[in-house]
Amino acid sequence: MNGGRETVAVLGLGVMGSVLAGALLEGGHDVTVWNRTPGRDAALVERGARRAGDALDAVRAAPVVVVCLYDHASVHETLDPLAEQLRGRVVVNLTTTTPNEARDLAAWAAEHGVRYLDGAIMATPPMIGTPGAAILYSGDEGVFGEVRGLLDVWATSTFEGTDPGRASLLDLAMLSGMYTMFAAFLHGAAMVGADGVSAGDYARRAAPFLAAMTEMFALDAEVIDSGDYSDPVQSLDWSDLGHLVRASEEQGVDPAPIAMVEQLRRRQVDAGHGAQGFARIYEGLRRR
Ligand code: FVH
């Protein structure tokens, strides 16, 4: 470290990796870049990044190595041959992986004397470096503290715990919610679209309504955390969603998204929990 200026290597110059490397350059750091396919580094080199001849060259150049590759397999494929050269260095892995994959990489790193921090980016590339961007981290808390100055260039950085899989777990849980919500939006748009209502008109109505509904998460969370579903605002019996499924079919639209929710509700009713709250579906989803 030199007056806050650090030397960093970035492996992976896809859409996200390029933006991360660019933000580090903006932040005044010395950045060495490498990408499997040559040519993706041109704009960064023009901005002052050093081009590494290969991944080994990049790793040798810096005590901190940021990895932003396609997936878990590509991270192993890239880092495994460099294990000895990585010994004693910090690896910050921002590749999206499952929690167990993150734990696997942390174990691999520990085995090779590599100091490992796992990160989960909760932002799109254009958001990096703006106030809306967040990155969750977990793993080695000492590393998080040491490289915090670098991390904060990209986003609001939060340390989520020493289990290396925790950041990824939170990330994928939130993405699961996001994709389910988008599927629900598309389903609603198809329902109204069948009667000629434009998706734009529907979005203008749906967005504020659904945003307001997210206020309910905290209330559901209180019930889930208490484990007591016996005093519901809305019982499972009362919440029959058959009419939503029928309406979708009447519109000539596949009811799959709402039918899935109705199936989860029905399972709880059939198990004798109809008088309990809708949040009891949480218990039905758990397998362990
Ligand atoms: N882009 C986004 O909005 C999301 C936001 C949340 C986090 N994700 C995750 O970030 C990782 C990288 O995403 P990306 O957007 O940069 O992805 P690509 O533009 O597709 O670039 C992929 C890079 O990975 C390299 N690569 C792929 N396979 C290998 C391999 N076997 N060995 C070495 N490198 C590999 C690829 O190189 P090349 O194809 O140019 O040679 C790119 O550099 C990702 O986990 C997202 O889930 C982004």
Image (spheres, rainbow, N blue to C red):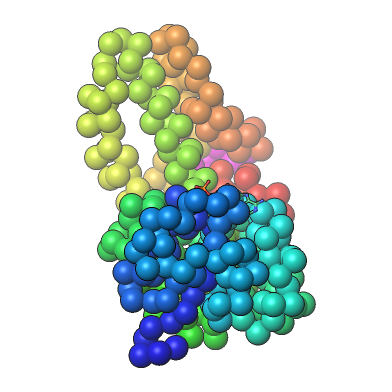
Classify 146 as above or below 156: below
Residue 26 showing in the rendered view: yes
Identify the residue at horizontal 56%, vertical 30% (top origin): 260
Location of residue 56 (image quadrant): bottom right
Quadrant of image for the N terminus: bottom left
The residues colored magenta run 272-279
Q: Give the residue at the far right of this rendering.
A: 111
Identify the residue at horizontal 26%, vertical 16% (top origin): 197
Quadrant of image for the C terminus: bottom right
Give how far across and how far down residue 263 sits, in percent: 59, 30
Residue 274 is one of the magenta-drawn residues: yes
Classify 286 as above or below 121: above
Give how far across and how far down residue 11 sits, in percent: 56, 63
Q: Does residue 173 appear to the left or right of 154 in the view shown? A: right
Give how far across and how far down residue 125 sits, in percent: 39, 52
Classify 60 as above or below 167: below
- Pick the front one: 235 or 221: 221
Residue 224 showing in the rendered view: no
- Pick the front one: 79 or 264: 79
